[in-house]
Amino acid sequence: MATRLTPADVERIAALAHLELTASETERFTRQLGDILTYFDQLQHIDTTGVPATTNPVTSAPVMREDTLTPSLPRDEALANAPDPGGHGLFRVPRVIG
Amino acid sequence: MPAPDVQTTADIRAAMADGVTAVEICSTYLDRIAAENDAIHAFTHVAGEQALEDAAAVDASGQGGDATYPLAGVPIAIKDNISTRGMPTTASSRILAGFVPPYDATVIERLRAAGAVIIGKTNCDEFAMGSTTEHSVSGPTRNPWDLARVPGGSSGGSAAAVAARLSPIALGSDTGGSIRQPAAFCGIVGLKPTYGRVSRYGLLAFASSLDQIGPFALTVADAAVLLAAIAGPDPADATSSAENVPPFTASLGEPVAHPTIGVPWKLLEDDVDADVSTAFTTAIDVLRSQGATIVDVPLPHAVYAVPTYYVVAPAEASSNLARYDGVRFGFRAPAGADRADLDTMYNRTRDTGFGDEVKRRIMLGTYALSAGYYDAYYVKAQQVRTLIRRDYDTAFERVDAVAMPTTPTVAFCLGEHSADPLRMYAGDVFTASANLTGLPALSVPGGRDPSGLPVGLQLVGRAFDEATLLRLAANYERDAPCWRKSPPTAALAPSIPAPPP
């Protein structure tokens, strides 16, 4: 499996992750992420045939509860940390449709 | 008897029973922070007035000396990735600049209910990603034993605060070693509880299947007191366990009879510095002299803990950190003159809001989860995780605990690993397994290198058996009392005020 990354790969990953990298970041991350992925190659040598994946380290029965109404965060508190609360009890964002 | 400069929760409880007030105790620690924090930078926010108000409320309520409030009047430092109502919580990230949570984490509610006084928020690696506390928007924390060295991370501020006697106890979080490694580097006790033992509600999520909140303290007994205060199921965290919470403090005085302790000697052959190895061998001799049987346990897959961890944790992080988008809280990048659409706002906010280490991990995780790579990286790592867990399950058929050095080296110098993330990651070799397997693990001061820097002894236990770890560590601590020595920066450590005549 090829793990060497190109700057174009890093730009594609950054776009998926909603990061707008500068040119120098793309150069630096291409090298560093390539080194780390090469380091991960050692995992490929381990025989995992038929081994189940662990997603939760401590297995326990699913927790169930009654579907009862409980108080939630008041709107003004939920909006208090917004960078642009907009003034109408809403979060305001830049224009979505051009 | 502890040395005079070791102030434990028991000392504070005794002083309050003698009439010393919570306000006096709080003021003593606030004075100490004012004198020392500029040099160490353990705290990023000192609660000051709010802490004094809370202490006054403890005094007014008469909680002091009442066993229902085991932490009455005890100051505590909180890692800045744990939500505190009305107090800044930024995870040392620019993207959460100015964020003040509208609610308390469950652990904070429980601490307040036990009478504790939140004295401030401590520095950490951004979103708990790092091993040095250098990856913080407010600059690095320094190790109280040597200010040119790192305190470890990511909970470095909490560890340094306790080591420098700026707070008697503290909370941190541990995703791959972030409590145990700084505890080892700073010469104090740190415990990562079993996954699910402590509620994660209100902990700013990094890797949800690995994260746990846990205690820092000067003594094993205080780690037990703090764990008892925060442990137990929580309806707000579906992954918190309904498992019975035993009385951790009551059993501390009873040593485990004829314990068997496993050591993965082969794992320790290549990776450990000579000074750490010498200290570890001495620590094992102490355990043996106390009646422990030491056996070799192979743990053949533990050597893969680091690459496994650095696939799993970034994958989970890339998902968890998607919520930081400049809309609901924290920092938003200003609109540029060129483009002012929503996607550009997201992308610029995240690029300027996150530091390099966080961006590296988000991209690693995004890559490992992306089409074509998911099976090769993510599924593979989750399978190796199962193999590591099976190794431990096999070991625990015949041992009560597994012992290892907490870290392969003592605290390194600031800047030493900044150009090479892989070298920093390699330091997690002995700690990451406990997160991947969910098992509890603690680090207790386990000797020193020739220059006096602390070395940590790590004990890993069975799931939900923190009690055995605490008993083993408390017994070890009695015969290896290196915690009694305080770092040079704590030379002027405060004594608890004298009781009124």
Image (cartoon, helix red, strand yellow):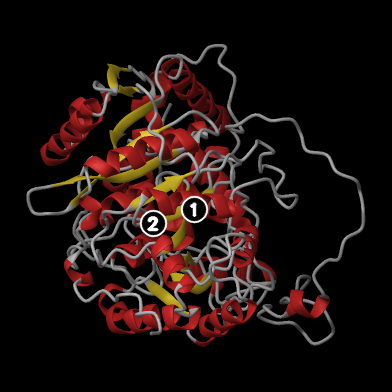
Amino acid at dot 2: Ala
Q: How many marks?
A: 2
**Residue sitting at x 37%, y 47%:** B180
- Residue B77 can be seen in this image: yes
Q: Quadrant of residue B473?
A: top left
Which residue occupies 28% across, 44% down? B477
Mark 2–mark 1 CB contact (< 8 Å)? yes
Kindly identify the amino acid type of the residue bearing the numbered disc 1: Val
* Residue B178, horizontal then vertical, whole percent: 40, 50
N-term-proximal mark, 2 vs 1: 2
Chain holding disc 1? B
User: Badge 1 is on which residue?
Assistant: B225
Other residues around mark 1 within 10 Å, as few (<14) / some (14–19) / many (≥20): many
The C terminus of chain B - image quarter: bottom left
**Residue at the extreme front of the image, as rendered:** B501
- Secondary structure beneath dot 2 equals strand
**Mark seen at residue B217:** 2
